[in-house]
Amino acid sequence: MKHDPIIEEARAAGRASFARFNNDRAAAFEDLRRQTEELRRMGGRVVSLPPRRPRKQSATTKKAG
């Protein structure tokens, strides 16, 4: 796979953000919930999509590896 600097930058930012919570997933998601609620209180738009089932992969669309 080719090296993509944009993907690497996004992953590094994600790792840095997650490290702020000592890699505690529950704490990181709680902070995201808090930020979302704060945005709603300020009148910001929060998009929510209904859950959907993953599509089944056929033999022709399944990735090798």
Image (cartoon, rainbow, N blue to C red):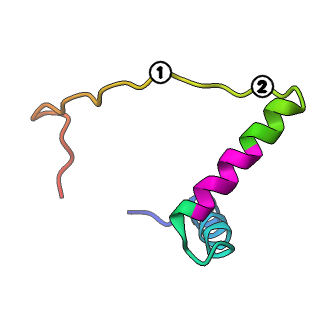
Query: Can you say which quadrant of the picture contains the C terminus?
Result: bottom left
Position of 19 with respect to 25 (left or right) is right
Residue density around tag 1, few if under 14, some if 14–19, many if 20 or more, within 10 Å? few
Question: On residue 50, which mark appears?
Answer: 1
7 over 16 or under it: above or below: above
Q: Quadrant of the N terminus?
A: bottom left
Query: Overall secondary structure of the magenta stretch?
Result: helix
Using the rendered image of the protein, determine whether residue 14 is visible from the camera's viewpoint. Answer: yes
Horizontal and vertical percent position of residue 36:
73, 40
Q: Earlier in the sequence, mark 2 or mark 1?
A: 2
Q: What residue type is labelled 1?
A: Pro
Q: Do the residues labelled 2 and 1 touch (CB within 8 Å)?
A: no
Whether residue 3 sits left or right of residue 59 in the image: it is: right
Q: Quadrant of residue 2?
A: bottom left
* 53 relative position to 24: left or right: left
- Decide whether residue 62 is among the magenta residues: no
